[in-house]
Amino acid sequence: MLFLSTRGKTDLVCSAHAITRGMADDGGLFVPQKFVAVPLEDIIALHNLSYQERAVKIISLFLTDYSEEELADAAARAYDAAKFGSCPAPVVQVNDNTDALELWHGPTSAFKDMALQILPLLLTKAIAKTGEQQKIVILTATSGDTGKAALEGFADVDGTEIIVFYPESGVSDIQKQQMVTQAGKNVHVFAVKGNFDDAQTGVKQIFANAGLNEEIAAQGCTLSSANSINWGRLVPQIVYYFSAYSDAVAAGRIKAGDEINFAVPTGNFGDILAGYYAKMMGLPVHKFICASNSNNVLTDFINTGIYDKRREFKKTISPSMDILVSSNLERLLYSVTDEDSEKVTEWMQQLNTEGVYNVGEKIHKKITSAFFGAWVDEQETAETIRRVYNDSKYLLDPHTAVAWRACEKYRLVTSDDRYAVVVSTASPYKFSGSVYEAVKNGGEELQSFDALHKLHELTGVPVPEKMLQLENMPVLHKEVIEPGNMAEAVKNSI
Ligand SMILES: *Cc1c(COP(=O)(O)O)cnc(C)c1O
């Protein structure tokens, strides 16, 4: 299996290359040449395998330059029971026609672990294949979840250093505590004065600074990123859509072959795109419900065919979906235009220069045949958390609540009440303050760990072990730097 760029200007490359490079040289994203069909019997049979084995079955269809043993080793280590418990991606029944696919049983209690636990292992194996001698230095600017998940994934992985920059006052207390307590001999964490954009801009400047990159190369290192456009992050996400379907059949929720719906809380469009790829491979899915918060650029796009980022950025209680440019959408456009890289390039250029593009009626129709877009405001999100808890005793985090409500809106508008799986992307305890306030319907505003304990007292829902330990862990990273000193920090870290 070879990979090409959505912009169509690069040669075909193997998966090891796509994973080490992250992004294609022409500015596009790597996509596989083709999607292998998985027969229904094989999908159903996944249920008899462990999650690790399911992962190998699906990932091996794409990463053909890795041996079965290599993938088995990566999957076994990534989704180890010590990290994810016995079941990394359980499907939990919430009401008669809706289940939650819980993707937050990993070390950081958010779904990014599903990809970021295995990516470092795929990456180090890829480096060995491409003959790279340099040490890989992963640079990440984070608004919260990604930074911690990358730290956990890369900590003590040989041949790598991991450097994370987070905005000093732009992450939640729990997210900050998760990062500043991270152990590992190759781990570096810096608070940056300013907001997420300052940190992100700083990282982009470091990547673009040719002189600095030469200096870094002279020290035997090469910079890389673990962001969500890397193919090595996308491919592990395809697995859990197949896995969930096989579990739903085994649990008697559906019959083999029935089409189901997935509702996905969406930011950068990685998670939901992985589901769409599963559908292209034959997974029986009727619709993907693309759920957004008040940053509803994707809802508008799915409803009109016009992507318009010229709007105010809003801070919400589902911060991992606060995004105006969903990078992975480029891969969907490539697919629905039957791989028309010229069109894709044109739209991406328009987005850059004018802030808007229009895909036209034909392509818009193709998109709405597989996707339904809905957005949910702050109040509805809180109401949904409260109502689902009261009705079903199931506690949603704010991101999952957005998807839950979007699924309800879809059912109201279309009368399509078929079985749906809501993709649950974070433990409610990761956002204890907002969730506690929602369940209590207002009242006192509590700080991080107080809210966590109160939420547990109120609901009795178990707190993830890792999150409990966090409160009393020693702070290992205290440095606060100016954005202008980020390059210096990188040089001193390697
Ligand atoms: C990253 C994230 C999302 C959005 O996923 P995308 O792949 O970026 O669309 C949703 N919920 C949580 C909790 C996340 O961390």
Image (cartoon, helix red, strand yellow):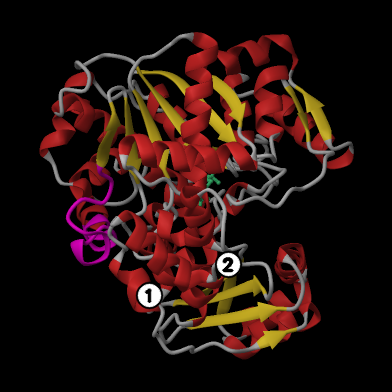
Q: Amino acid at mark 2?
A: Ser
- Decide which of 297, 41 is in the foreground and name it: 297
Q: The magenta stretch spans which residues?
A: 73-90
Mark toward the viewer: 1 or 2: 2
- Mark 2, Cα crowd under 10 Å, few <14 / some 14-19 / many 20+, is some
Quarter holding residue 170: bottom right
Say above or below: 260 vs 217: above
* Visible residue check, residue 32: no
Say above or below: 77 vs 345: below
Residue 348 painted magenta: no
Q: How many marks?
A: 2
- Mark 1, Cα crowd under 10 Å, few <14 / some 14-19 / many 20+, is some
Q: Position of residue 389 (x, y in %)?
A: 38, 42
Q: Position of residue 392 (x, y in %)?
A: 32, 36
Q: Is residue 379 left or right of residue 411?
A: right
Q: Which residue is mark 2?
A: 172
CA–CA distance in space, label 1 to label 2: 27 Å
Residue sitting at 63 percent across and 89 percent down?
479
Q: Which residue is mark 1?
A: 157
Residue sitting at 48 percent across and 88 percent down?
475
Furthest-left residue in this view: 48
Q: Secondary structure at mark 1?
A: loop
Q: Secondary structure at mark 2?
A: loop
